[in-house]
Image (cartoon, rainbow, N blue to C red):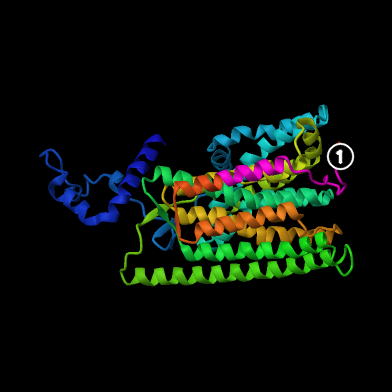
Amino acid sequence: MASTAAAGSDSRRLLPGRQNSSHQMDRINGNSFKSTNEVPPFSLGADEFDDDTLIASDPPSHRIGGFERNAGPVSRGVFHSLKVVLLTSKLNLLIPCGFVAIVVNYTTGNHGWVFPLTLLGIIPLAERMGFATEQLAFFTGPTVGGLLNATFGNATELIISIHALRSGKLRVVQQSLLGSILSNLLLVLGCAFFSGGVTCGKTEQKFSKSDAVVSSGLLLMAVLGLLPPTVLHYTHSEVHSGKSGLALSRFSSCVMLVAYACYIYFELSSSRRREESNELNQGRGVNVGADNEEAPDISKWEAIAWLAILTVWISVLSDYLVDAIDGASQAWNIPVAFISVILLPIVGNAAEHASAVMFAMKDKLDLSLGVAIGSSTQMSMFGIPFCVVIGWMMGQPMDLNFHLFETASLLMTVLVVAFLLQDGTSNCLKGLMLFLCYLIVAASFYVHSDQDPDGNSPSQN
């Protein structure tokens, strides 16, 4: 088996030579066979031909733009799948924290320990969910794959929010969703801009201005959806006190979901046209990019199975996490608003944070924006209205009145990011500015006195 693996490895190392056949022929014609004892491979007779020089035919693949994504049969058994998913990430060392949290909850009931242990246990699960989604994207193509990545990238926050909704902790839902948007726009995007500007050796990095403008417009539309219910509440101008704002929130949520669906349809259609254009250019011999071969590590059904397992396990831990928020707030003497807006989103966005920074360091800023801005757009235009509709179905009065302080923070954040993105360039100074803005927002929520999760006013000392 070892010799077979070595032979396979040698043959794979020969594959890049096909990208530059003229260079390879120059080597064969004499540059690489200067010794008289060496015989070019094409001069070997039938009896002397070595099987190791054969290159196996490639499995079926999907060509996407200039990239060739190899989606051939990859199933190598359950043990290989377990090895790939559980042993290839160092973050998986934190998985036992989830089991420890459950044990601590039932043995001591100390929420001051249950909460951080649960947070640590969810981090690797969120990262592995992103990995399983990427593996599934090999079999769906780039368009559906991108949609899957965006959806499951926010799955952790949505699962936590649904558990909080079921428990009646509406403010935790609102603040965790808001915190996810703030974290992506300021912390994730700021770190990506800063790391890209420092490591790429460029004064400025460029990205697609048109995509950034569309995303900024959607974010502003989301703010527009949050403003009227908040203003109605604080100006006491509702026609039916306590009911008009809730009805308006549900109507606006449905409109926002329709707008997001139209945006997804537009993106899918545009991406499909780009793919067809690339295929046409390739058919005419036009080089649209370098050929890179990628192959999935697990099969399609293994990826689906892992997504289901990880979703269930995150759901279990989210139940303990939501129940421990109040106890952790009292044990640590930290406001619930700070936990909901700052700590919970950082855990949910950990995998996205790492991906955005990695792409920026490789000078792939459009991908970084797709992670940070795309996730914020989906959370604001889909996550928030989705939770309002789900709360409607559950009989919970979840609305878009995020209170004046939170709505103002979101409005200013969207405006700052929109202004920084309007020229289509980034640098380390812009990244530092966004990161410092996040520190200001975090400090603000640390000293912010908010209603408790049950809707009662906090006691005044």
Q: Quadrant of residue 89?
A: top right
Q: Is residue 147 visible?
A: yes
Mark 1 residue element: loop
Which residue is pictured at 63% across the width and 40% down the height? 123
Q: Give the range drawn in magenta.
A: 436-458
Q: Position of residue 177 (x, y in %)?
A: 70, 52
* Residue 459 higher or lower than 232, as above or below: above
Which residue is pictured at 66% across the width and 35% down the height? 120
* Residue 359 higher or lower than 331, as above or below: below
Q: Where is residue 350 in the image (x, y as percent from the top left)?
A: 59, 43
Residue 443 lies within the magenta run: yes
What quarter of the picture does the C terminus occupy?
A: top right
Residue 19 lies within the magenta run: no
Which residue is pictured at 60% across the width and 45% down the height? 438
Q: Is residue 276 left or right of residue 350?
A: left
Residue hosting label 1: 460
Q: Nearer the viewer, residue 249 or 235?
A: 235
Check disc 1 and give the amino acid type. Answer: Gln
Q: Position of residue 110 (x, y in %)?
A: 80, 29
* Residue 152 higher or lower than 214, as above or below: above
Q: Position of residue 342 (x, y in %)?
A: 67, 43
Q: Quadrant of residue 60?
A: bottom left
